[in-house]
Image: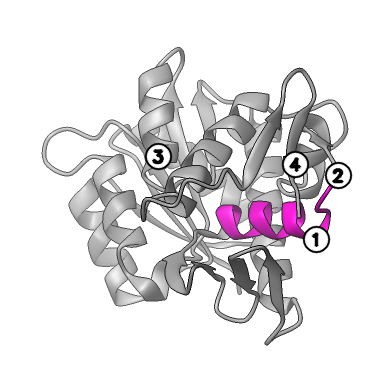
Amino acid sequence: MTIIYAVDDDPDVLSTLGRVLRADGYEVQLGSSGKEALEMVDRRKPDLLILDIIMPPGIDGVTVCRNVRANTNLILLPILFLTAKGATDDIVDGLDAGADDYIVKPFDIKELRARVAALLRRGKRTEQQAPSSILQIRNLKLDTNTYCAYVDEEQISLTTTEYRLLRHLMENHNQTLTLSQLLQSVWDYPPDTGDPDLVRAHVRNLRKKLEKSGNEQNFIRTVYGVGYIIAS
């Protein structure tokens, strides 16, 4: 059975998450603090982690996310953030920490179900992709078995979403992909839905990783007013 951990310090939100997700057939474990979240993940790896960003006192959701991403065994764990409406800085911090997606409070139940289902589908498809395949463009390599990228043989660990985004761009190299196309192909959103800022944030984070070693190549190029391209 699919296991989801949901962590939020608001008991009403937590109750709603538990009720809705269990009704959809998931095994759900609930927590109310960042400390609990880390303990839950340490005991047993879930299929999806849902985190509130602001969880005073102690460890907030962003800190939990960074700790999870620092564990190589959890690098591909899908993470969905819950955030208060209008908390743009919180969203940016959450995506920078390695979250795959976010949903704004107060959230629509139908939207929550759709986001959860999409994240779980992405995770399953990623695991089922053909092993031991190497994609290479210039001095950038992507190992689809380990989900790691390499720039001049320096290994770079990627989250699930970063891996899927980079793979899609590399498999479609020399093609400009629009934000809408990326939302559909990488995030599994229906046409004309999803937040373009989600794509921009993940592209920014991916660029940081690919260029962190001082490499000055601009692998992912912006085609202004259109989208992104990786050119061979």
Q: Nearer the viewer, residue 8 or 78?
A: 78
Q: Which residues are magenta?
A: 161-174
Residue 132 in sight here: yes
| Residue 124 shown left or right of residue 198 in the figure | right
| Residue 65 shown left or right of residue 34 in the figure | right
Q: Describe the element under mark 3 as helix, strand or loop.
A: helix
Image position, residue 28 (x, y; %):
48, 60
Name the residue that disc number 4 marks.
229
| Residue 214 shown left or right of residue 203 in the figure | left
Q: Describe the element under mark 4 as helix, strand or loop.
A: strand
Name the residue that disc number 3 marks.
96
Question: Which amino acid type corresponds to the residue marked 4 in the rendered image?
Answer: Ile
Name the residue that disc number 2 marks.
175
Residue name at image x 61 percent, y 74 percent: 1
Estimate the spatial distance between the alpha carbons at disc 3 and disc 1, rounded to whole Å: 25 Å
The answer to whether residue 105 is above or below residue 214 is above
Q: Which of the image's four quarters has the C terminus?
A: bottom right
Q: Are marks 4 and 3 in contact (CB under 8 Å)?
A: no
Estimate the spatial distance between the alpha carbons at disc 4 and disc 2, rounded to whole Å: 6 Å
